Image: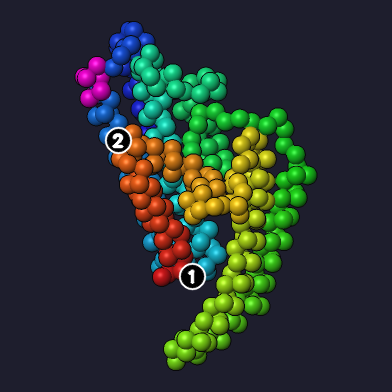
């Protein structure tokens, strides 16, 4: 509803000017655009943040099953990020629509011409973005021609088998190790604590790798196939990373693309240095991870 109102306002501005938008935005145009954008940003921000806070409150105080709580919190964070991307991208598209000769239009990908602003402000377009395995909004995405249902079945079978494996490994190995660690921790026996940590690190790594494959290789590919989503690069060869920075850029491409598009690049454009912008991205990502881990575990 917020973006639909903004699109109607943009149409009215074009009709009022009777010029299809000014060739170059004047200072008055910029002030009007920023004033409208502030209202839109506040509307999106309050809506998305309330959804995240309400979900976090319910998960923290009412949901005590770790899996259900984690899934609920992950969904709330994803919705928050998608709402932010939807608002910020449409802001840029709206500016290019109002001023079609400005630099923003020249930078728009050719594929956007298939669904130009404001024709993209529809419930169907938003629903597709809501389900697409990406956090960065585009009016149009590359699409595959058909759905390979056998491929979907194989990927979902992998998700099921790996989920069972993680559950068995956690129940049979991780849980007993944790219970046996209580005595050593209580007596501050450093040798016993170190020995338990080494054992836990092994099973934790196995579960993490299984979870990574189940999510990024199996589930996201199955979802992309059902949505006929063309971009299947959800990760690259993070296991060959030569630095921590390379690892963070390659192991979770959807989050990396969001951070680069909506956090890092805008900060660089505002005059921030690369180091300061990287720290801001790291802090922002850290807050999101604290929500994802701390709220479901009530920690």
Mark 2, other Cα within 10 Å: few <14 / some 14–19 / many ≥20:
few
Residue plotted at (67% across, 72% down): 168
Residue 194 in the image, given as x and y percentages of width and height: 52, 81
288 over 138 or under it: above or below:
below
Mark 1, other Cα within 10 Å: few <14 / some 14–19 / many ≥20:
few
Residue plotted at (52% across, 87% down): 192
Q: Residue furthest right?
A: 150
Q: Quadrant of residue 23?
A: top left
Please tell me which residue lies in front, 230 or 195. 195
Predominant SS along the magenta part: helix
Looking at the rendering, in which quadrant would you find the N terminus?
top left
What is the magenta range?
26-31
Which residue in the structure is indicated by mark 1?
Answer: 64
Number of residue marks = 2
Q: Is residue 252 visible?
A: no
Which residue in the structure is indicated by mark 2?
Answer: 270
């Amino acid at each position: 509803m917020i973006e639909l109102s903004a699109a109607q306002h943009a149409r009215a501005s074009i009709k009022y000017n009777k010029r299809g938008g000014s060739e170059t935005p004047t200072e008055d145009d910029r002030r009007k655009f920023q004033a409208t954008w502030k209202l839109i940003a506040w509307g999106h921000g309050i809506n998305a943040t309330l959804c995240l806070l309400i979900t976090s409150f319910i998960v923290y105080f009412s949901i005590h099953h770790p899996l259900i709580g984690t899934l609920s919190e992950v969904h709330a964070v994803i919705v928050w990020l998608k709402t932010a991307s939807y608002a910020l991208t449409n802001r840029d598209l709206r500016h290019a629509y109002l001023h079609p000769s400005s630099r923003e239009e020249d930078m728009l990908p050719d594929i956007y011409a298939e669904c130009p602003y404001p024709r993209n402000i529809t419930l169907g377009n938003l629903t597709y973005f809501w389900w697409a395995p990406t956090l960065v909004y585009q009016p149009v995405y590359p699409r595959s021609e058909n759905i390979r249902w056998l491929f979907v079945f194989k990927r979902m079978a992998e998700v099921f088998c790996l989920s069972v494996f993680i559950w068995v490994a956690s129940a049979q190995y991780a849980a007993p190790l944790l219970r046996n660690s209580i005595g050593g921790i209580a007596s501050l026996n450093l040798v016993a604590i170190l020995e338990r940590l080494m054992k836990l690190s092994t099973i934790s790594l196995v579960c993490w790798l299984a979870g990574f494959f189940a999510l990024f290789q199996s589930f996201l590919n199955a979802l992309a196939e059902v949505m006929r989503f063309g971009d299947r690069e959800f990760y690259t060869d993070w296991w060959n990373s030569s630095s921590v920075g390379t690892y963070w850029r390659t192991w979770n491409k959807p989050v990396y693309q969001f951070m680069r598009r909506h956090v890092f690049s805008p900060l660089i454009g505002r005059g921030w240095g690369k180091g300061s912008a990287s720290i801001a991205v790291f802090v922002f990502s850290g807050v999101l991870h604290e929500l994802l881990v701390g709220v479901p575990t009530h920690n």
